Amino acid sequence: MYAVLKTLHVLSIIVWIGGMAFTLFFLRPALTVLEPPLRLRLMQNVLGRFFGAVLALALLTLVTGVWMMLDYASRLPDTPVADMRMPWTWSAMAGLGVLMIAIFGHIRFVLFQRLRHAVAASAWAAGGAALSGIRVWVRTNLILGLLIVGLVFLGGGPL
């Protein structure tokens, strides 16, 4: 069961981080050839699909991460879960992961809604501002995600 959880956990992270990198470094720059109305409509459509997937992936990452930590704790002889000593990298990964989910919540439920409303109202300047805010926070989440990947290679233990 642990191998299945770990596989789902890692695949979720790969898709989330890969999607952010693709959007920031490839899709967004390629769309500069389009006029703002078309660019903003396209980004709204793409991000709507991506954010729907990320919502599921973030929850899956959280659930599988907690489950793996509890599974690990249950294998320690005579150690209550409350007394489990996780490697510092696990605590850092968990804390940064929760921060990423919180940032994603702001992106999805605040900034993306601003983009949707701006596009619906043909308010292209407001849509551009919303998209700019999304870009800043997606970049922040990408950096945090890459830090988490780095922590794995620093000695993330059996995860």
Image (tube, rainbow, N blue to C red):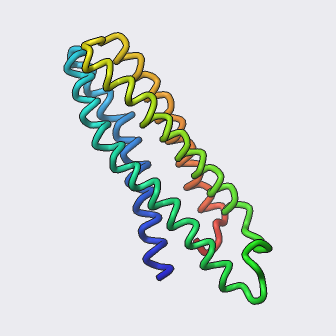
Q: Position of residue 74 (x, y in %)?
A: 66, 83
Q: Foreground: 158 or 111?
A: 111
Asked which quadrant contains residue 153, the reply is: bottom right
Q: Position of residue 82 (x, y in %)?
A: 76, 72
Number of on-image labels: 0
Q: Position of residue 151 (x, y in %)?
A: 63, 57
Outermost residue on the bottom side: it is 77
Asked which quadrant contains residue 86, the reply is: bottom right
Q: Position of residue 6 (x, y in %)?
A: 48, 71
Query: Vertically, is 85 above or below 135?
Result: below
Asked which quadrant contains residue 131, the reply is: top left
Q: Foreground: 119 or 85?
A: 119
Residue positioned 27% across, 22% down in the render: 40
Residue 139 appears left or right of 116: right
Q: Foreground: 121 or 142?
A: 121
Residue positioned 66% across, 66% down in the render: 155
Residue positioned 41% across, 16% down in the render: 129
Query: Vertically, is 132 above or below 18?
Result: above
Q: Which quarter of the image is occupied by the C terminus?
A: bottom right
Residue positioned 39% across, 34% down in the render: 24
Query: Vertically, is 54 above or below 115?
Result: below
